[in-house]
């Protein structure tokens, strides 16, 4: 759901209108939540009925209330459920009793039944953006009086004489992100699409942005997805100097389309007989991925459900086996090209023939062109159907072996396997080339 969909829902709340008076309670509660998100008191999608919330409610309520209105935050905390985007997580054993309630007569009813309230994932992400909060605040206070011009101004749009320059506003970013994910879906399913045609169509929807500006924005989106470990469009090389608002738009899109984004998991690991004929002379990519600058992120918990795509790929044995077969065929081709068919025949698929714990997958050979001296070459294979910047997992055993046998070791990264199949090589110790982050810990009862 887009920001304007929520703007409309906020402007059409169903408050209590008893005695011809519109109750401000729901409006005050949502304003209080946005206040606490802005001040980073609320950092994840779990809104507790606690002192910070009730105090924030009182501050917002006092600006809106008349003499006949009572400061009862438990009422909107309960009745916002009717709006669809406000959900309740009950305490253990309290779901049935909560379902029977028609209202919360006191604050203790909330405390005795509820762990916390939570918003739609996408709404929570949207509320993290200042411009969106301002739009939603106006939707609450002005109800149905917001004009298209006002929406554009609040969301950061440029005036007509400045269009095509300056920072992208939220609506432009949202349009570009939606288009990117459509192309990404086509790309992962190996369906044809034209990036040029998409840019032309986008230009008509944006503020006269140039083709170069649109392409750069697509590359920014790739960078955000790479940082998150998501698949990205390999044809849009990641560029990491993006505006923070764009990341928020991407997160909101993922949250709003969680089910469809989840289908990307199966697409990234899908293996079928390649439709292409491999030209082995063009398989090796000598241009290694650029090192990505580290970017500090606020300690905010984002989506409730996040697919770990590199982990899914690592657990996919058929994908891994296909990549190892691809590397073996490549190594045989390379050795045959230098007249060493004898060595090509002796290449060993070590992980298959001897087991997974060796620290490498393939044993091949290197031949010194100066003296024809032969040395074993131990190769660890990491495979993805996505682009070369997609993160991958390394085990402690693989890392240790790469350090111990660094003169004879390489990690081969196979990427875009289901489209054309490319390889880049990282020779020597793995940690010379990549940054390693701990993902799992071994739990034992040893007394260290």
Image (tube, rainbow, N blue to C red):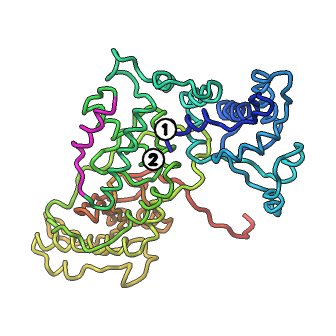
- Image coordinates of residue 337 in percent, x first then y, are 11, 70
- Relative to 270, does residue 356 appear above or below in the rendering? below
Q: Secondary structure at mark 2?
A: helix
- Relative to 83, does residue 143 appear above or below in the rendering? above
Q: Secondary structure at mark 1?
A: loop
Q: Where is residue 267, by image quadrant?
A: bottom left
Q: Residue furthest bottom?
A: 353
Q: Where is residue 223, by image quadrant?
A: top left
- Image coordinates of residue 214 in percent, x first then y, are 30, 35
Say whether residue 354 is left or right of residue 52: left
81 and 168: which one is in front? 81
- Image coordinates of residue 190 in percent, x first then y, are 27, 61
Say whether residue 359 is left or right of residue 419: right
Q: Residues within 10 Å of mark 1 (few under 14, many from 20)?
A: few
Q: Where is residue 132, by image quadrant?
A: top right
Q: Which residue is mark 1?
A: 295
- In front of the other: label 2 or label 1? 2
- Image coordinates of residue 291 in percent, x first then y, are 37, 44
Q: Quick check: can you spot residue 45?
A: no
Q: Are marks 2 and 1 in contact (CB under 8 Å)?
A: yes
- Relative to 140, does residue 159 appear above or below in the rendering? above
Quadrant of image for the C terminus: bottom right
Q: Which residue is mark 2?
A: 227
311 and 439: which one is in front? 311
- Relative to 169, does residue 293 appear above or below in the rendering? below
Q: Which residues are magenta?
A: 192-206
Say whether residue 212 is left or right of residue 17: left
Residue 198 lies in magenta, yes or no? yes
For image coordinates 28% across by 75% down, the residue present is 325
For image coordinates 81% across by 22% down, the residue present is 66
Q: Residue furthest top?
A: 161
């Amino acid at each position: 759901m887009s920001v304007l969909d929520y703007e409309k829902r906020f402007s059409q709340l169903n408050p209590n209108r008893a005695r011809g008076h519109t109750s401000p309670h729901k409006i005050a509660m949502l304003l209080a939540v946005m206040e606490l998100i802005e001040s980073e008191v609320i950092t994840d999608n779990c809104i507790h009925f606690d002192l910070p919330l009730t105090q924030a409610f009182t501050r917002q309520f006092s600006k809106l209330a008349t003499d006949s209105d009572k400061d009862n935050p438990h009422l909107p905390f309960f009745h916002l459920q009717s709006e669809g985007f406000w959900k309740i997580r009950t305490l253990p054993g309290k779901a049935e009793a909560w379902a029977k309630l028609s209202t919360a007569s006191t604050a203790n009813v909330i405390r005795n039944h509820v762990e916390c309230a939570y918003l739609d994932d996408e709404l929570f992400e949207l509320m993290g953006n200042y411009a969106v909060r301002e739009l939603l605040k106006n939707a609450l206070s002005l109800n149905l009086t917001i004009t298209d011009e006002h929406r554009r101004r609040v969301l950061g749009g440029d005036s007509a004489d400045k269009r095509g320059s300056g920072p992208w506003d939220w609506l432009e970013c949202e349009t570009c992100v939606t288009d990117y994910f459509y192309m990404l879906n086509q790309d992962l399913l190996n369906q044809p699409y034209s990036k040029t045609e998409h840019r032309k169509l986008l230009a008509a929807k944006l503020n006269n942005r140039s083709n170069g500006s649109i392409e750069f924005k697509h590359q920014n989106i790739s960078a955000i997805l790479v940082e998150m470990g998501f698949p990205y469009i390999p044809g849009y090389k990641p560029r990491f100097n993006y505006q923070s608002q764009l990341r928020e738009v991407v997160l909101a899109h993922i949250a709003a389309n969680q089910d469809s984004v989840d289908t990307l998991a199966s697409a990234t690991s899908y293996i079928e007989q390649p439709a292409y004929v491999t030209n082995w002379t063009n398989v090796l990519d000598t241009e290694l991925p650029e090192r990505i600058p580290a970017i500090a992120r606020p300690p905010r918990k984002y989506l409730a459900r996040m697919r770990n795509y590199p982990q899914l790929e690592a657990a996919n044995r058929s994908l891994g086996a296909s990549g190892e077969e691809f590397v073996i065929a490549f190594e045989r081709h390379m050795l045959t090209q230098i007249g060493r068919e004898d060595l090509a025949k002796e290449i060993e698929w070590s992980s298959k023939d001897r087991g997974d714990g060796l620290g490498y997958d393939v044993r091949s050979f290197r031949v010194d062109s100066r003296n024809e001296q032969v040395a074993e070459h131990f190769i660890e294979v990491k495979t993805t159907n996505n682009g070369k910047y997609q993160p991958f997992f390394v085990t402690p055993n693989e890392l240790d072996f790469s350090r111990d046998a660094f003169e004879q070791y390489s990690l081969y990264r196979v990427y875009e396997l289901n489209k054309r199949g490319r390889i880049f090589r990282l020779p020597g110790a793995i940690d010379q080339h990549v940054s390693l982050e701990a993902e799992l810990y071994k739990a034992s009862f040893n007394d260290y």
